[in-house]
Image (spheres, helix red, strand yellow):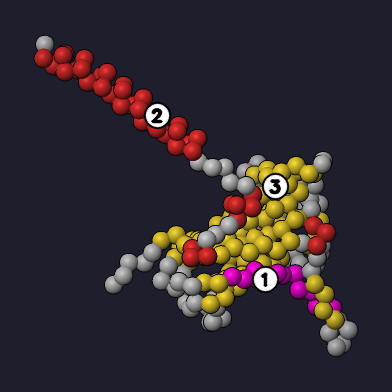
Amino acid sequence: MKKNLKFRVAIPILLIISVFLISCKSKNDENKKKLTPEEELQVAPENGFSQTYFFPNNTFTPQKEILPNNDILLHPEIYLKGMVKDVKSHYDVTIITDYYDNVNVEDCKFVVTAISPDTTSRRSQQYKIVFNDKQDKVISSEGEQVLKRNTRVLFKDMKFSSAGEAQFKVALAPGHGRFSFSGIKSVSVKVEKVKEELES
């Protein structure tokens, strides 16, 4: 009898607690501010940095260099830079690519190379963008064009060997560097502190 009474008392209490928790969660969700595409790229200076490169005429064009023998050397890369102040911390490095849904290639391979401020440390990672992938986020509509965003965390828990200006070279992968393609608006690097190393 006592067990049944305890059970009858416990059920309403559990129901009240779960309703309260669900109510708090929904209020927290409502209070979360929806970030604009620009705000998504921002990083507080004490936590890292972000930088964006905008492609002229929304076109990725390899830069041409004419050598003394008149051969043409292509430089299909851009450099994104920012200050790293804290070498004790770990950082996540995210590459964000904004492109239009009428981009004239189906996919493209890029190589991103992280270069430490003292240039003694380099780390590269290749990744492939499949344009108009279902997971890419629609961030705006400009007339008949839809602007989408591809976001990729390339380096997790990365440490820098020295403080100063770090560089990230974004290049078309070998075999992709001999052509231009249109419909790509910008590429950004976001370097954000994720955790502190424990003091010894």
From the image, tell me which residue sits under label 2.
Answer: 22
* Disc 1, SS: strand
Label 1 CA crowd tier, 10 Å (few <14, some 14–19, many 20+): some
Q: Residue furthest top?
A: 1
- Is residue 136 shown above or below 177? above
- Which one is nearer the viewer's eye here, 163 or 171? 163
Residue 49, x across and y down, in percent: 56, 65
In magenta segment, residue 77: yes
| Residue type at numbered disc 3 | Lys
Instruction: Tell which circle, 3 or 1, labels the residue nearer the N-terminal end.
Output: 1
- Is residue 149 shown above or below 161? above
Dividing the image into 4 quarters, which one contains the C terminus? Answer: bottom left
Query: In this image, 195 relative to 71: left or right?
Result: left
Label 2 CA crowd tier, 10 Å (few <14, some 14–19, many 20+): few
Residue 132 appearing in the image = no
Cα separation between marks 3 and 2? 33 Å
From the image, tell me which residue sits under label 3.
Answer: 148
Cα separation between marks 3 and 1? 22 Å
Instruction: Tell which circle, 3 or 2, labels the residue nearer the N-terminal end.
Output: 2
From the image, tell me which residue sits under label 1.
Answer: 79
| Residue type at numbered disc 1 | Tyr
Which residue lies at the image location 11% right of the left edge and 14% below the top edge? 2
Magenta stretch?
Answer: 72-82
* Residues at circles 3 and 2 in contact by the CB criterion of under 8 Å: no
